[in-house]
Amino acid sequence: MAQVLAASPTGVFTVTGLARRLGHSGGAVGNACETLVCRGEAERLGSKPRTYRATSATAAAAQHAAPPPPTTPGGTPQVPRQTSQQAPSAPPPGGRPVPITRPNGQKYHPRALAQLPDVEALQRLREAQVAVLLYGPPGTGKTSLIEAAFPDLITVAGDGDTTVGDLIGEYTQDANGGYEFVYGPLVTAMQEGRALLLDDATLISPKVLAALYPAMDGRRQIQVKAHKGETITAADGFYVIAGHNPGVHGAVLTEALASRFSMQIQVGSDYDLAASLKINRTAVRIARNLATLQQAGDVGWAPQLRELIAFQKIADVLGAETAFANLVGIAPLEDRDTVAEIVTKAIGRPVTALALGRQL
């Protein structure tokens, strides 16, 4: 991939164009391009469609790549489709992976997973069709990681009201008063070979999730009974990943759901990252202390990275004193006194939950 990009330094390539040129599936090519982006050896320009071009580091990466494949008499490269048994490329020697821009414009800073940047590890698991379940408290960065790893992501926000129609599709009234069948995110992801995130999957009814399971096993097919019994077969690149918040009321990880996700990864807040992001050191220290107490079972809540980022934004606008008061105020009622005590001790003055004062 690096050789193709380096050969045309000013060229802009789509995933589809690269896939046709190299003979790989679109999913494999997209993953490889994102790996190069993660390493700073390529640049992603657009997302619809995804387009890439070389950076100043691409040529160096190309020199370490395998020799170009043989070509047919017509000049088309003969490249075998990559399989899950082939050894993935080695991580870049030294250096720190560059932050990755998510669809909302925010930066994601990769973390370590199996001696790789987590983004690259997930991309390799997708290529090998190993379904992953990320679990941990809300605000730890599960969704951020998945969005950074898969730019082609389609997201289903799960809750107790999610229906089979929300996943597969249903009839919807059109402008002329008639009805047409509109495919849901599962069918769209299968047809287009895209990644599908079941966010808060364990809040979705097990009966609803059962409609997804045939797409995840060896069949890679589902039947749309509501639409003439149509059979949908997953295209190359289709992949399912899920998020689970164990502490959220109503979240139940059933045996049927757990068995579909061969790899389950715990995600906690990276407090070292919080410190490197210039978040108030005292706030980070408080969060670490509460996290330790939470692990010991002494409290049920600790600020995660999401809360710490919000803390700093509030501190920048209204001052640190207000941000600390808000930190106490967002703690659950059963933990609020303990949080207030810890915050008070850390900053050396009494702190209570943020509240309106007297009339001005």
Image (cartoon, rainbow, N blue to C red):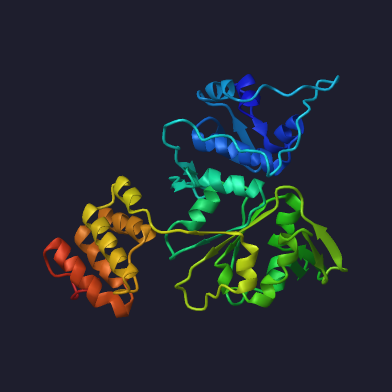
Image location (x, y in percent) of residue 201:
58, 68
The residue furthest bottom is: 334
Image location (x, y in percent) of residue 339:
24, 71
The residue furthest left is: 348
User: Which of the 4 image quadrants contains residue 217?
Assistant: bottom right
Residue 330 visible, this angle: yes
- Residue at image coords 50%, 50%: 104
Q: Looking at the picture, does residue 105 appear above or below residue 308?
A: above
Q: Looking at the picture, does residue 134 appear above or below residue 328?
A: above
Residue 8 visible, this angle: no
Image location (x, y in percent) of residue 91:
51, 35
Q: Looking at the picture, does residue 269 appear above or below residue 31?
A: below
Quadrant in the picture for the C terminus: bottom left
Residue in the foreground of this view, choosing between 39 and 225: 39
- Residue at image coords 85%, 21%: 74
- Is 306 left or right of 34, judged from the image as shown? left
Residue in the foreground of this view, choosing between 314 and 273: 273
Quadrant in the picture for the N terminus: top right
The residue furthest right is: 228
- Is 237 left or right of 53, judged from the image as shown? right
Residue in the foreground of this view, choosing between 226 and 240: 240
- Is 297 left or right of 165, judged from the image as shown? left
Image location (x, y in percent) of residue 8:
64, 21
Q: Looking at the picture, does residue 121 appear above or below residue 282?
A: above
